[in-house]
């Protein structure tokens, strides 16, 4: 059934690449659109490396990685989304950018195409309002790294039809993911408490209470988390953390959601996390998490 459906992903950064792996692995024809060839080429390399490791670990049969990569179609032309059944947008956390993408796609995609945003903090109803199809629009918030994390927080906007939400839910399950329903509210479930929690941890570092290794060890040991908060932040990226904090703080006025000064200094120093090889920890930037 999945092979007869096409999923389009807009933006192939940290999240879009992972979501594209999920879609292609589930057997969907997968189209990935970005503005330039470089990020698309990078996404293709990351996906191939991840799937190769999955074969080596026995999670995929020999040759299955090549079959999945054959489903992974990259493009810099939005018009190639004309056959998509579902489009998942994963570009910068910026309402104007998201509106302009959906306006363009509304003219390209057929009436039955469901639009979804992977936004972490912007209102689904607001994004849907500028899409030209607010009744066929849902929030689908994947977790980082999407190719390993099953959870998707799904939220209807105020004008989302029941039929759209049910169809998007069924597609999410067909992707092999675990949807949970949330209201359209800043941060949904996880980021509502994770953004302030992570900011508290960043401020602990800035105050010299402990270093990143010790904080991560303490949280993993005591709370049983698979990743420490600073390992997770290095995957999220300081640039994205700044955008998330600004959006969340602007919407809620929660003081603990305000971006910690250390994040801004790290951006100034080029220490964005895994993507630059240096964040709270140091990395071999050729390696991706889970690969
Ligand atoms: N990073 C996380 O931990 C995380 C987790 C869950 C959800 N999100 C959400 O996912 C979205 C993307 O975040 P990210 O961290 O993957 O961002 P990112 O900066 O890693 O990637 C964004 C990508 O979008 C592309 N892009 C920008 N404008 C575009 C346009 N007009 N058309 C096509 N492509 C365009 C960029 O070239 C880039 O490749 C955001 O809404 C964010 O809130 C992020």
Image: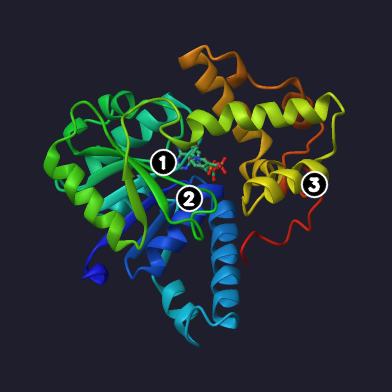
Disc 1 under 8 Å from ligand 1? The reply is yes
Looking at the image, tell me whether mark 1 or mark 2 is earlier in sequence order: 2
Residue underneath mark 2? 16
In this rendering, is residue 281 above or below 51? above
Contact, mark 1 vs mark 2 (Cβ under 8 Å): yes
Q: Secondary structure at mark 2?
A: helix
Q: Secondary structure at mark 3?
A: loop
Disc 2 under 8 Å from ligand 1? The reply is yes
Which numbered circle lies on residue 118?
A: 1
Is there any visible trace of residue 93 in the rendered image?
no
Residue underneath mark 3? 281
Q: Residue at horizontal 56%, vertical 48%?
A: 14
In this rendering, is residue 76 above or below 94? below
Rendering quarter of residue 64: bottom left
Task: Indicate the position of residue 272 as horizontal and vertical percent values.
Answer: 72, 39
User: Distance of mark 1 from mark 2, alpha carbons?
Assistant: 9 Å
């Amino acid at each position: 059934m999945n092979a007869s459906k096409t999923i389009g992903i807009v933006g192939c950064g940290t999240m879009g690449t992972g979501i594209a792996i999920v879609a292609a692995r589930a057997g969907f024809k997968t189209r990935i659109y970005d503005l330039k060839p470089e990020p698309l080429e990078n996404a293709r390399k990351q996906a191939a490396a991840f799937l190769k490791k999955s074969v080596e670990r026995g999670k995929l049969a020999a040759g299955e990685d090549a079959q999945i990569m054959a489903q992974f179609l990259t493009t810099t032309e939005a018009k190639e989304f004309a056959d998509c059944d579902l489009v998942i947008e994963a570009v910068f956390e910026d309402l104007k950018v998201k509106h302009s993408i959906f306006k363009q796609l509304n003219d390209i995609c057929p009436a039955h195409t469901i639009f979804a945003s992977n936004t972490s903090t912007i209102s689904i109803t607001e994004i849907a309002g500028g899409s030209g199809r607010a009744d066929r629009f849902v929030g689908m918030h994947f977790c980082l790294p999407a190719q390993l994390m099953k959870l998707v927080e799904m939220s209807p906007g105020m004008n989302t039809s029941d039929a759209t939400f049910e169809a998007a839910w069924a597609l999410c399950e067909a992707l092999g993911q675990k949807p949970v329903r949330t209201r359209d509210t800043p941060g949904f479930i996880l980021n509502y408490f994770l953004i302030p929690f992570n900011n508290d941890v960043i401020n602990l570092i800035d105050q010299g209470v402990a270093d990143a290794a010790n904080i991560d060890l303490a949280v993993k040991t005591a709370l049983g988390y698979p990743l420490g908060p600073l390992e997770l932040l290095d995957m999220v990226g300081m640039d994205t953390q700044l955008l998330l904090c600004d959006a969340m703080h602007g919407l809620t006025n929660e003081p603990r959601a305000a971006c910690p000064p250390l994040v801004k200094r790290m951006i100034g120093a080029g220490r964005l996390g895994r993507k630059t090889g240096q964040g709270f920890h140091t990395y071999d930037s050729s390696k991706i998490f889970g690969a």
